Image: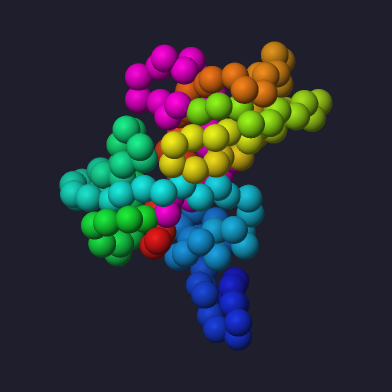
Amino acid sequence: IVVMRNAQIAQVGTPRELYEAPANVFVATFMGEASQLLGEMSGDDAAGAGVRLGHLTMRLPRRGLADGPVTVMVRPESVVLVDPEERDALQATVASAIYMGSHAEYTLSTEVGELFAIVREAGALRSTGERVGVRLVDHGVYAVGP
C-alpha cells in the first residue's frame, strides 16, 4: 500500500507495517484511530529507547528517531484502565464515558495529552470525573517524530 499526502508518498508498506510502524502522525491516523501524547525519547539499549510520558517511562523502538521530543501514538485498544494508585500507570481523569453494548469508549485526560480508549469489559462504566490509572500495552504504541 502507498499512502499519499499532498501528492507525495508518505509511506509504503503492508497494511500491518503501516498500522504497527507508521512513519509519522499522518500515516498513523490515516491507518486508524490513534491518540497523540507528548513524550521525550532518550537512551538506547537492546529493548529500545526510553520514552518518558510524564512520570512514566516505557521502552519503544527508536526507529531512527533522535533523542528529544517525540509524539507517541496510542491505539484505543492499547489502553488498559487500572487503579489510580497503581505504580507505573499514567494518572487520568475520565472526560467522557459511553456504553456501546459490547464495549465502552472513554476519553481520558492525562498530563501528556488526551487518550481515546476502547475497553472490551463494559460491565461497570466509569463515571465522568473519576480518577483512573492508565497502562499502555506493548502492541499499538509507537513513537514518531514531533
The foreground one among 27 and 115 is 115
Q: Which residues are magenta?
A: 71-91
Q: Is residue 101 left or right of residue 111?
A: right
Left or right: 64 in relation to 136: left
Residue 136 pos. (x, y %): 46, 34
Q: Residue 100, located in which quarter of the rendered image?
A: top right
Q: With respect to residue 84, does 142 lie above or below?
A: below
Which x, y percent locates residue 78?
53, 37
Residue furthest to the right: 101
Residue 125: quadrant of the picture:
top right
Q: Look at the image and say whether residue 50 sits in the magenta stretch.
A: no
Query: Residue placed at 52% from the left, 75% from the top?
Result: 10
**x, y percent for residue 94:** 61, 27
Task: Kindly tell me whether residue 58 is visible in this rendering.
Answer: no
Q: Position of residue 145 (x, y in %)?
A: 39, 62
Q: Residue at x 45, y 65 (%)?
A: 23
Q: Is residue 113 placed above or below 31 in the rendered structure?
A: above
Q: Is residue 29 above or below residue 40?
A: below
Q: Is residue 32 visible?
A: yes
Left or right placement of residue 47 versus residue 15 in this view: left
Q: Give the mark count.
A: 0
For the point 30% across and 36% down, the residue is 57
Q: Image quadrant for the C terminus?
A: bottom left
At a point 67% along the width and 19% down the height, the residue shown is 127
* Residue 73 on the magenta span: yes
Which colour assignment does the render follow? rainbow
Q: Quadrant of the N terminus?
A: bottom right
